[in-house]
Image (spheres, rainbow, N blue to C red):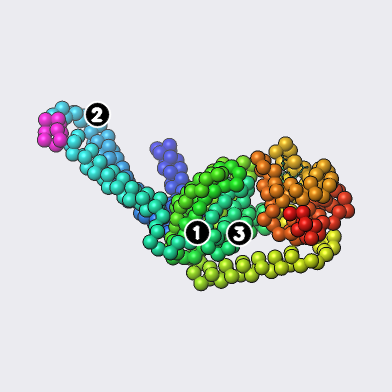
Amino acid sequence: MRFLVSGLARWVVLFVGFFGAGSVYAEYGVNFPEPASGSAQEIYDIHMMTMRVSTLLLVIVFAIVFYSLYFHRKSRGYKADQKFHDTWFGHWSWIIVPTLVLGVDLTIANNANAVLEKVWVVPDDKELMDVKVTGHQWWWEFDYLDHGVKVESRYVPKEDSGDLYLREVDNRLVLPVGTNIRFLHTSADVLHAFWVPELAVKKDAIPGYVTETWVEITREGVFRGQCAELCGTWHARMPIVVEAVPKEQFLAWIDERNAAKAAAAAEASADKTWTMEELMAKGEELYNTKCGACHQVTGIGLPPAFPPLKGSAIATGPIDAHLDIVIKGQPGTAMMAWGGLNDLEIAAIVTYERNAWGNNTGDLVQPADVKQHR
Ligand SMILES: [Cu+2]
């Protein structure tokens, strides 16, 4: 009896712990997160239907099992009925029951097939917005092809992310609600995978290939996902944060990004000469976000994969060779070409690398030098 009670108590604790926790940590509930796109909703509905069918079958089967075990046990003197097979039901139940179950299975399969079709075939009858999604070690690049806007999205370090460590990014993937959006997936280095549970569809990002998925977001909100393909040391540092907003707000955001880009370009192209302090400050910020993942903010790198820049022959040698590798990258290695940065950004980063961590070369690289070098 004591055993029974303690056993029961354990189940109650388990049950409350498992299901009760759902209300405390809404985000870690038992079920899938609430869908935010048409096809995600359909996938969710199939999931719920399947769960209901299997729960019903489970209850029926176990009810019969427990009933039989209890009432037909030997100690009650029950004698097994040897004539069951002679009855009509005894004969045909072996065919009827599996056929019914198969019928339910086919219904599920049919539904699943219809949704899969919808998921993979990009609709071409409605307005379509293209977003190119490029996976990098270890950040995401979102290129709004129809609006000329590019976003680099990186995880927020522990100190600044509070409860959302590895769930928050500096620049979110802002998307309009109620528009058909086509994602074009690719990778700049290794395999990554784009996955936001509320949008349901997961897709590998393969270097050298472009694959596509599409989504129509049905409600506003912030949806968090992550890279879903093991892609190296900092695979965990590739969260994805989708911010779904009304269309007008999305267009206003695009205008804002374009204005900021124009302002940055104007600042970079002005033939201004910058002081060491200005370039070092700008350079440190840029270096820490864009280069620090591999070469480390301390400049010591992660040998042998990622060389140190502190005391490196290139970072302390001729400026031309240094500019060369930053602008063109090193093909075949993780060192990508950073030529997409503007002259001022490259000047600042290179100046920073040549003077930080005891690399005191005293070299000052101006935007004009970068322009000339390109
Ligand atoms: Cu990844």
User: Please, what secondary structure does the residue beneath circle 2 have?
Assistant: helix
Amino acid at the residue labelled 3: Val
Say whether disc 2 or disc 3 marks the residue closer to the N-terminus: 2
Kindly report the distance in space between the C-alpha atoms of the residues bearing marks 1 and 2.
Answer: 70 Å
Asked if residue 295 is positioned above or below residue 283 in the image, the reply reads above
Q: Is residue 374 left or right of residue 24?
A: right
Residue 82 spot, x, y in % from top left = 15, 27
Q: Which residue is mark 3?
A: 151
Quick check: is 90 in the magenta stretch?
yes
How many numbered marks, from 0 up?
3
Q: Which residue is mark 2?
A: 74
Amino acid at the residue labelled 2: Lys
Neighbours of disc 3 within 10 Å: few (<14), some (14-19), many (20+): some
Q: Picture quarter containing residue 259?
A: bottom right
Q: Which residue is mark 1?
A: 130
Say whether disc 1 or disc 3 marks the residue closer to the N-terminus: 1
Residue 279 spot, x, y in % from top left = 80, 60
Q: What's drawn in magenta, residue-wise?
A: 84-92
Neighbours of disc 2 within 10 Å: few (<14), some (14-19), many (20+): few
Amino acid at the residue labelled 1: Asp
Kindly report the distance in space between the C-alpha atoms of the residues bearing marks 1 and 3.
Answer: 14 Å
Q: Nearer the viewer, residue 242 or 180?
A: 180
